[in-house]
C-alpha cells in the first residue's frame, strides 16, 4: 500500500511596501521596505537572512498578496508567480524596515525590471526570511568571500563583527566588474576588505575570486569560512578549500547563490541533480 502523501506546507506570503530606493552603484540598487507587515516577520539569528520575492506577469492583473494556494486552482503552472531570492542587507527594528540590495542588469528578468521601476508606495510580497550563517566571535580568523550577489551578506557579517567582535581578524574578498561597483563597508580594523575587479560582466575566464583564494595564506587554528557566489566558481572554491587546503567542509558556509546561464527557476531545480551540487560526494 502506498504511503499517504504529506500535505503541502503552506508558506506565509508577507507584504511590505517600498519606502525608498537608492542607486548604490551602476548595478546595485537598494530597496528599503517597511510597513505593517514588518511585525509578522520571524527574523533568524543570522547575517545571511534571505527572502524570496514574488513576481507575476503584469498582464494577468494579479493583486498582492497573491495567495498562491488559490491561484494554483485557476492558473496553469507557466502563469504562476515566480520567486527570486535576495539577502536582507539590514534589519532596522526601530524604523520597522528592511534593506534589500539587488544586483540589476537593466530590465533583465522580473526582479530587475521591478527594482529599476519601483517607487515609494509600491507593494512587494515574499516568503521568508530564512538563513543560517552567523559569525562566531571566538573564531581565530574570518574568511568571507563572494561576487556581487554576496555583497549584502558579507556586508551584514562585517557590520555584526564590528559591533560584537571589534578585535576580529580576517579578510573579505569581493569580486565585482570594476571600481564603480565598490561600496563603503564597515568592518573591524583587523579584517581587510579586498575588491577584485573582473574587468566586465561575469565570465568564467574573467573570474578572480578562486584565484585570490588560492593565493591567500590562511593561519592555523579556527578559521570560519563564508564563501558564496556563482555555482561553477563555488565548486572550484570547494575543491580548493576542502580537498586541497584541508578545511572542514561541515564547519563552513559555502554554496551557490546563482548559476551562469540559468534563471532562478532552473537554478533551483538543478540543485537536486548532479550538476547543481557543490559537493562532490
Image (cartoon, grey):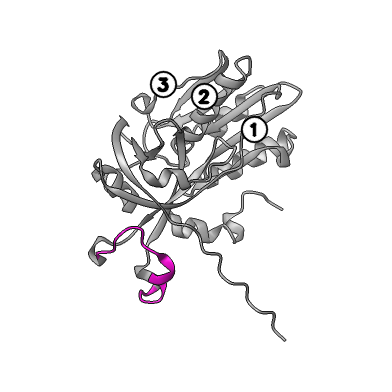
Reading the image, the residue beneath label 1 is 225
Q: Which residue is painted at 46% across and 24% down in the image? A: 195
Q: Earlier in the sequence, mark 3 or mark 1?
A: 3
Residue 155 in percent (x, y) is at: 49, 28
Q: Position of residue 197 (x, y in %)?
A: 42, 27
- Residue 19 drawn at (x, y percent): 30, 38
Q: Are marks 3 and 1 in contact (CB under 8 Å)?
A: no
Q: Secondary structure at mark 3?
A: loop
Distance from disc 2 to disc 1, alpha carbons, whole Å, reads 16 Å
Q: Quadrant of residue 168?
A: top right
Per the image, the residue denoted by label 2 is 159
Q: Quadrant of the N terminus?
A: bottom right
Point 74% across, 26% down: residue: 222
Measured as percent of width and height from the top left, residue 270 is found at 54, 59
* Category of crowding for the residue at label 1, using alpha-carbon neighbours closer than 10 angstroms: few (below 14), some (14–19), many (at least 20): many
What residue is pinned by disc 3? 184
Would residue 260 be seen by someone viewing this image from the given angle? no
Q: Is residue 123 above or below residue 147?
A: below
Q: Nearer the viewer, residue 192 or 201?
A: 192
The residue carrying pointer 3 sits among few (fewer than 14), some (14 to 19) or many (20 or more) residues within 10 Å by Cα, namely few
- Precedes in sequence: disc 2 or disc 1: 2
Nearest the camera: 175 or 225? Answer: 225
Q: Which mark is residue 97?
A: none
Identify the element where label 1 is drawn: strand
Amino acid at each position: 500500500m502506498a504511503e499517504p502523501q504529506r500535505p503541502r506546507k503552506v508558506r506565509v506570503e508577507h507584504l511590505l511596501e517600498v519606502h525608498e530606493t537608492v542607486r548604490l552603484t551602476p548595478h546595485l540598487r537598494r530597496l528599503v521596505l517597511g510597513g505593517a507587515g514588518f511585525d509578522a516577520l520571524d527574523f533568524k539569528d543570522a547575517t545571511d537572512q534571505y527572502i524570496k520575492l514574488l513576481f507575476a506577469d503584469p498582464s494577468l492583473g494579479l493583486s498582492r498578496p497573491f495567495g498562491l494556494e488559490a491561484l494554483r486552482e485557476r492558473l496553469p503552472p507557466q502563469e504562476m508567480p515566480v520567486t527570486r531570492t535576495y539577502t536582507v542587507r539590514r534589519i532596522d527594528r526601530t524604523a520597522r524596515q528592511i534593506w534589500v540590495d539587488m544586483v540589476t542588469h537593466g530590465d533583465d528578468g522580473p526582479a530587475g525590471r521591478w527594482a529599476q521601476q519601483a517607487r515609494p508606495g509600491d507593494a512587494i510580497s515574499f516568503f521568508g526570511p530564512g538563513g543560517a550563517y552567523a559569525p562566531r566571535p571566538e573564531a581565530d580568523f574570518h574568511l568571507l568571500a563572494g561576487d556581487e550577489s554576496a555583497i549584502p551578506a558579507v556586508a551584514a557579517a562585517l557590520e555584526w563583527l564590528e559591533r560584537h567582535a571589534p578585535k576580529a581578524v580576517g579578510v573579505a574578498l569581493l569580486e565585482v566588474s570594476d571600481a564603480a561597483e565598490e561600496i563603503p563597508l564597515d568592518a573591524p580594523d583587523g579584517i581587510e576588505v579586498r575588491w577584485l575587479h573582473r574587468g566586465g560582466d561575469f565570465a568564467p575566464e574573467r573570474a578572480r575570486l578562486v584565484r585570490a583564494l588560492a593565493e591567500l595564506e590562511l593561519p592555523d587554528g579556527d578559521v570560519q569560512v563564508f564563501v558564496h557566489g556563482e555555482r561553477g566558481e563555488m565548486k572550484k572554491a570547494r575543491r580548493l578549500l576542502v580537498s586541497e587546503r584541508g578545511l572542514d567542509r561541515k564547519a563552513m558556509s559555502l554554496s551557490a547563490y546563482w548559476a551562469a546561464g540559468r534563471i532562478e527557476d532552473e537554478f533551483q531545480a538543478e540543485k537536486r541533480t548532479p550538476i547543481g551540487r557543490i559537493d562532490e560526494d
